[in-house]
Image (spheres, rainbow, N blue to C red):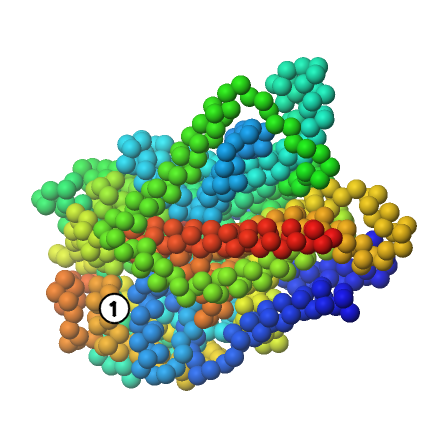
Amino acid sequence: MNRFRKIIFPFFISFFAVLVFVSCNQTKQNEVVVYTSIDQVFSEPVLKTFEKKTGITVKAVFDTEEAKSTGVLNRLIAEKSNPQCDVFWSGDPMRAGVLKQKGITEAYQSSESKGINPCFIDKDYNWTGFSARARVLLINTQLVKEQDYPKSILDLTNEKYKGKFAIANPLFGTASFHIAALFTELGDKKAKQFLEDLKKNDVIIAVSNGDVKKKVSSGEIEMGLTDTDDANEAIKEGAPVKMIFLDQNGFGNLIVPNTVSLIKNSPDNANGKKLIDFLLSPETEKMLAVSCAQMPLHKKVTTPANIPSLDKIVPMNIDYDKAAKKDEQIKEYLKEWVTK
Amino acid sequence: MKTPKTKYFLWLIVAIFAVTILLPLLMLIFEALFTETNFAFDNFLTIFQGEVLKSIANSLIISLSTGLLSVIIGTGLAFILTKIKLPLKNILRLILLLPLFLPPYITSVAWTDFWLFAGFPKSFIYGIPSVIFILTTVYIPLSAFIISGSLENVSASIEEAGEMMSSYKTVFFKIILPLIRPALFSSFILIFILSVSEFAVPSYLSVNVFTTEIFTQFTAFYNYSSAIAHALVLTLICFIIIFPGKHYLLQTPFVSFGKKSHKIKYYSAEKPFIYFLVYLTYIILFVFLPVMMLIIQSTEGSNFALMQSIKQLLPAFSDTFLLTISSAVFITILGLIFALLRNKILDYILLFTFAVPAVVTGIALIKFYNTPALNFIYGTSAVIIFAFISRFIFISEKIIATGLEQIPPSYLEAASVMGASPFYSFKKILLPLTSEALFTAFFTAIIFSIGELSAVIMVYPPGISLLSVRIFTLSANAPQNMVSAMCLTALLFTLIIIFIMLIIKNTVFKKQWKQS
């Protein structure tokens, strides 16, 4: 009895406590599971608003573009045979494209997608775009005079910018999408020549878009290609920087919408659709415009004055599906290019 | 104390471990190695490309140098901590451990900012030397911790006898160093494995290492088989490097728990304050400087960053606390069982689970547990506990095995002769005498689990919030002051847990020892 009281009983009590703790997490409620590669600081408030409005509990798995969305995308692929997630909210159409190709998402045409330009919607409705970012050139205004600002992305091969600019590793994230888009726009031969010229011009390959922002803001380098949300953060932090849209007199600037997809055979398809409807609504676009300077795809969404309007930007006219496929084709080449 | 009955029980636990932790890893590896019935050569061919071989060379240069430097400097610090009479020794020991509680990535951000501020050349900042420097500062506490335990265990009588014949310098190099050689090897190999698997620091400093290759295969190509084949090569490299020292790693003390049968011989230095100053200089330069950088950064722009970060991280505190404590309990109990069995094959198995990159562990757990029948594990926190066990059981087992080896067999023999049952011997002799080792294993498991990111980010169930994951996901796009403030908050959280653990140790274990 003494042995039971002193050793076995406490052991089983702690084991039981762990089991209770564990099983508490298993209780299914009126809930929806979302995996997102959108940075948590921006996505969490949106999901909380959905919770408040609908009473549906949102269980989220967050990831970050800084980690190249390793977690969520690989999880979704690994979970294909037994999906745990209802909705995938991605920062760009590329990842949604990968999931579509692997048969992980299913078609859903939301009523909220009316009013969104069809070029931002997958033709099979496996993903729908909303709130967009753009790829911009972030410039340190203390280091570069206005007359020296590049006008086109192709200007970065000019010798006067040698060793003074950065791009994020083009194997990952929106940077990879940017390069794939350039390949579809310029053709393989011209695009490869452009990348070779960039290398000759000592382009700095940063770890991520956030790293590009940090390097430009601190004055470590003069300029770098990044996303509007990173650029906007740098401006909010008071860094001496300015973002400019490139190729406004040429083939246009790349626009990168968020996308949302419904997971095939997901645990709670109905709640998943409700969340998708909410994410595609003008209300969400407004929230994202305020929090991270994303440009609404719905017309008539009121935004802060500092948010550029899509109407005033000449966009790069690309087929997102085609760009996603091109990205897969050029990955080996890009891997060699990065380590060259 | 091992009767057939208890042996069967222990082996049953081992079998459960094999099915729940080892089998997922083996199945994943098998899947990567074979396509239907053929061996998948293609997955290994890319390894012989020039750039990949270069990345392997970089990994080896970084991890071998980090291991070597950490052991050399760690030995010096351990000597000062153990052999010199210093004031506030326990506080100094705790301060030394601080870099271990910060994510290496954050340490690299702090150091890089300092170097840029101080005008260091970029060729130094973004290169192999800086990676070695940062990883060395991160892992020195680990080697100092292991080696000081071993130094404490060197019998004073041996040193005194040596000093009668020769100078202390000769005694140190000819007697003490050979006696602590196992601890030197153990810490070198542990740090080697941790550095060779490190991805974030080399990546931040633009150094291409072999883990970058694995990461690229996972994230850019979504090629599991190739990534796992690469990870297997990394594990093989670890084993090849470890092989010459395997005797020291698998059969000898990891952290020593002494002071039971002898006193410590202090070095009677002429000017002990010089040693104190050396230690203090190290602490100021390599511990306080990065922490100060974090404090300065956290106060830039807003004075409320720390309060905001606590608010942001609050949802993660309870989950992290409960899960790391629960995992540490399981890790310690399993470590004790493995240590009691003292089996060579088991040692290699644990070494294997430790050397496998964490991302592979995560994927293996998903592939194995993500079925409707096993949702009660995969869909709950249980999968996180499994991930922690898989990653850290090796360290825990080595610590406890060391504690067990300190107990003279005559104690158990005497108990047996007196008619004590195996359980009674275990309770009255083994448990009290290994209490310090058990506590250290428990404590180490908590520290490592709090910082674990790569495996748990792959498996954490929706709705669960862990500190390491939350800091990581919140850090993206957060201003630098918030990132630094969140790291400081995590540091405070870890210190509070350590403080609570130390109070428990000082009350419960002392009481238990007196009762025994």
Q: Is residue A97 visible?
A: no
At label 1, which amino acid type do we have?
Answer: Leu
With respect to residue A75, does B339 lie above or below?
Answer: above
With respect to residue B397, does B55 lie above or below?
Answer: above
Question: What residue lies at 20% left-to-right and 39% top-to-bottom?
Answer: A161
Place of residue A130 in the rendered image (x, y in percent of width and height, measured from the top left): 27, 72
The residue to which callout 1 is attached is: A288
Place of residue B176 in the rendered image (x, y in percent of width and height, measured from the top left): 66, 26
In which quadrant of the rendered view does residue A16 lie?
A: bottom right
Viewer-proximal residue among A134 and B10: B10
All told, the count of numbered labels is: 1
Place of residue B375 in the rendered image (x, y in percent of width and height, measured from the top left): 57, 74
Instruction: Tell me the SS state at disc 1.
Output: helix
Question: Which chain does the numbered disc 1 sit on?
Answer: A
Q: Is residue A257 visible?
A: yes
Question: What residue lies at 34% left-to-right and 73% top-to-bottom?
Answer: A47
Label 1 neighbourhood size at 10 Å, few (<14), some (14-19), many (20+)?
Answer: many
Is B225 on the left-hand or right-hand side of A55? right
Question: What residue lies at 24% left-to-right and 81% top-to-bottom?
Answer: A114
Question: What residue lies at 74% left-to-right and 68% top-to-bottom?
Answer: A4
Is A284 on the left-hand or right-hand side of B424? left
Place of residue B89 in the rendered image (x, y in percent of width and height, measured from the top left): 52, 37
Viewer-proximal residue among A43 and A126: A43
Is A60 on the left-hand or right-hand side of A113? right
In which quadrant of the rendered view does residue B18 lie?
A: bottom right
Viewer-proximal residue among A11 and A50: A11
